[in-house]
Image (cartoon, rainbow, N blue to C red):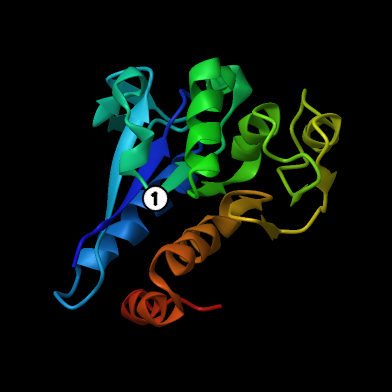
Amino acid sequence: MNSKKVLLFLAQGFEDLEAASIIDICGWTYYREHLQKVDVSVTGFHKEVTGRFGLKIKTDVLIDDINPKEYEALAIPGGFHSHGFDEAYDVKVLNLAESMYNSGGIIATMCVGILPIAKAGLLKGKRATTYPFSKKHDNPRYLREYGCQYSGKSIEIDDRIISCAGPSQSLHVVMIMLEMLLGSEETRKIKEFIVFEE
């Protein structure tokens, strides 16, 4: 059984819990032999990326060396613009997201991780949600400026693009991504092992 491959993009200043939830939950697919495996590769612009609250994660592959065809999903946690998250709007990230989405890939975002997806033009006519309490950024307006319908929900899914309002929904976003990748029955087994409550 071939493993599914998720590409996790981390900008400087990423939200620590959101990034960790992707790595952790996908890691649980290795808890039992019979589970369908999901591998996570971390990418970014630096060999090591630092989260807003101090979590340091080494990248597996730099963004310039990515072959998007090797992955079934792209995950982008949110982060703090005051701590370097602006690099998530780089054209290399936008092109990567567009390439993966147009080839049938899933895009799972958290918090402000949806904003680069809007800038890439992938949300025109679609629904999405985002973190509404940023000090200096009107995130819902940003989505609307790129043709997106801001739903204001805790979690939103529209045509293989997942978004959420903040860190507390991060585990749910990962589970939705896994269900899209593996199916509901396989995801149910993983939920059982981690004692996940809906």
Query: Residue, x 36% and y 23% (percent of image)?
Result: 63
Q: Is residue 99 left or right of residue 70?
A: right
Residue 196 in view here: yes
Query: Residue, x 27% and y 20% (percent of image)?
Result: 47
Amino acid type, residue under disc 1 in the picture: Glu
Measured from the top left, where is residue 189 in percent x and y? 34, 81
Hey, which quadrant is residue 178 in on the image? bottom left
Give the SS element for disc 1.
loop
Query: Residue, x 61% and y 53% (percent of image)?
Result: 162
Query: Residue, x 32% and y 58% (percent of image)?
Result: 26
Q: Which quadrant, please, contains the N terminus?
A: bottom left
Camera-side residue: 2 or 13? 2
Q: Which quadrant, please, contains the C terminus?
A: bottom right
Residue that lies at the very extreme toward the front in this rendered image: 103
Position of 160 relative to 97 (above/below): below
Residue 76 in view here: no
Measured from the top left, where is residue 174 in percent x and y? 47, 59
Residue that label 1 marks: 72
Measured from the top left, where is residue 110 in percent x and y? 58, 46
Measured from the top left, where is residue 159 in percent x and y? 65, 56
